[in-house]
Amino acid sequence: MLPKQFRLKNKAAFSATYRVKNSSHKGGVTLFAGIKKKDSETPTRVGFVVSKKTHKRAVKRNRLRRLMRESYRLVLKNNDLGNSQNYMSLIFVGTEHALGKNFAEIQNIINNLIQRLK
C-alpha cells in the first residue's frame, strides 16, 4: 500500500487534477497529470480510479485498482519516476480494456505512461 503522504484523497484535489486536462492513454489506463510543482519538497500525490461503468462487480474494479496501485508502488520503490515527480498530482483511471490484463501487462502500461510525461 502507498504511504499516506503519497495518496490523493479529497474531491477538490481530484477535480483540480482533471481540470488541467493533461492526459495520456495506453492499454486501458489513462493518466491525468495535475499542475507542475513550484518546489520539490512536496511529494507527488497519486489517485487510482475505476468507475462503476467499467464493470458492475466491485471485485473486478478493486482488483484493477490494486494492480495499478502496486505497479506504482514498485516504480516509486525503484525510484524510476522520471518527470512524474514534477507534478503535484497524478490520477490513474482504469477502463474496461484493462480488466483482463495481468500484473506484468499493467506494470508495463504504468511504466510507459510515467515515462511519457513531459
Image (cartoon, rainbow, N blue to C red):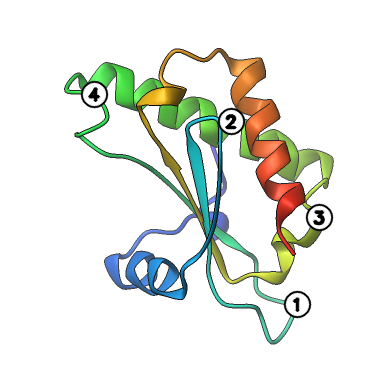
Mark earlier in primary sequence (4, 1):
1
Image quarter of residue 11: bottom left
The amino acid on which the numbered mark 1 sits, given as a three-letter code, is: Ser
Measured in 3D between alpha carbons, the distance from the residue under mark 1 to the one under mark 2, in whole angstroms, is 24 Å
Measured in 3D between alpha carbons, the distance from the residue under mark 4 to the one under mark 1, in whole angstroms, is 38 Å
The amino acid on which the numbered mark 2 sits, given as a three-letter code, is: Glu
Q: Decide which of 48, 1 is in the foreground and name it.
A: 48
The amino acid on which the numbered mark 4 sits, given as a three-letter code, is: His
- For this view, does 49 lie left or right of residue 51? right
> Which label sits on residue 70?
2
Q: Circle 1 is placed at which residue position?
A: 40
> Which label sits on residue 55?
4
Judged by depth in the image, the label closer to the viewer, 4 or 1, is 4
Mark earlier in primary sequence (1, 2):
1
Measured in 3D between alpha carbons, the distance from the residue under mark 2 to the one under mark 4, in whole angstroms, is 20 Å
**Judging from the image, what secondary structure is the residue with disc 3 in?**
helix
The residue that appears at 66% across and 45% down in the rendered structure is 113
How many C-alpha atoms fall within 10 Å of the one at disc 3: few (<14), some, or many (≥20)?
some
**Judging from the image, what secondary structure is the residue with disc 4 in?**
loop
Q: Circle 3 is placed at which residue position?
A: 82
Report if the CB atoms under discs 3 and 1 are less than 8 Å apart.
no
In the rendered image, residue 51, in percent from the top left (x then y), is placed at 26, 39
The residue that appears at 20% across and 19% down in the rendered structure is 57
How many C-alpha atoms fall within 10 Å of the one at disc 1: few (<14), some, or many (≥20)?
few
How many C-alpha atoms fall within 10 Å of the one at disc 4: few (<14), some, or many (≥20)?
some
